[in-house]
Image (tube, rainbow, N blue to C red):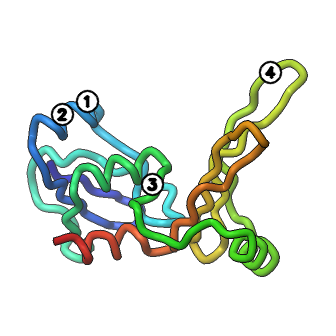
Amino acid sequence: MQLWCRVCNISCLLGGDPQEIRFLLGTNENFPCITPLCSGRLEKLKSGPISSNSHSVSIPIKNFYRAINGFGTGLGEPATLERITKLLTTKKIVKVAGEEVGQPERVIIDMLVLEDGTRMHFASSTKGACLYYIEEPSSCVEAIQHEP
């Protein structure tokens, strides 16, 4: 399956077992773009050429699935208190992903995106909010380049 984002002009060729691809992606025709800070959508290409200046990458289905669901690609630095403090005190937050819930209103934060493209992924724990993963700005491209 090949996907293309009109906004950042990236073309992704998904690799893996076709049955696994169908199972993980279902019948969806478009997905959030995996390029950091891109707000575009990856659309399934039916046929025909894409833009000649498109950047093409091959990505394993499991890495793609993690990326479109906000879990990063598996690469990145551990979420240490020292690293979190440095990032949040030196970089501007440019995007907050989350949802409003409950009565009275509360907000669940899933991810913060910093000005350099770093994504900070959050989850809940019994002790409170948990920053479980820090995704580096170009992690999708790096993950693709480092896949065997």
Which of 44 and 106 lies nearest the eye of the viewer?
106
Q: Amino acid at mark 3?
A: Gly
Q: Earlier in the sequence, mark 3 or mark 4?
A: 3
Residue under label 3: 40
Q: Residues within 10 Å of mark 4 (few under 14, many from 20)?
A: few
Residue located at (13% from left, 44% from top)? 46
Q: Earlier in the sequence, mark 4 or mark 2?
A: 2
State if disc 3 and disc 2 touch (CB < 8 Å).
no
Q: Which residue is mark 1?
A: 26
Residue 109 placement (x, y as % from top left): 71, 44
* Helix, strand or loop under label 4: loop
How far apart are labels 1 and 4 at the CA level? 30 Å
Measured in 3D between alpha carbons, the distance from the residue under mark 1 to the one under mark 3, in whole angstroms, is 20 Å
Residue at point 43%, 48% (across, down) = 32
The answer for how far apart the CA atoms under marks 3 and 4 are is 30 Å
Q: Which residue matches tag 4?
A: 102
Q: Nearer the viewer, mark 1 or mark 3?
A: 1
In the rendered image, the residue lying farthest to the top is: 103
Which residue reaches farthest right? 104
Evaluate if marks 1 and 3 touch, with contact meaning CB atoms under 8 Å apart: no
- Please report whichever mark, 1 or 3, sits nearer to the chain's N-terminal start: 1
Q: Of helix, strand and loop, which one carries label 1?
A: loop
Give the CA distance from mark 2 to mark 3. 22 Å
Q: Identify the secondary structure beneath mark 2.
A: helix
Quadrant in the picture for residue 102: top right
- Dot 3 falls on a residue whose secondary structure is loop
Q: Which residue is mark 2?
A: 22
**Cβ–Cβ below 8 Å for labels 2 and 1?**
yes
Q: Residues within 10 Å of mark 3 (few under 14, many from 20)?
A: some
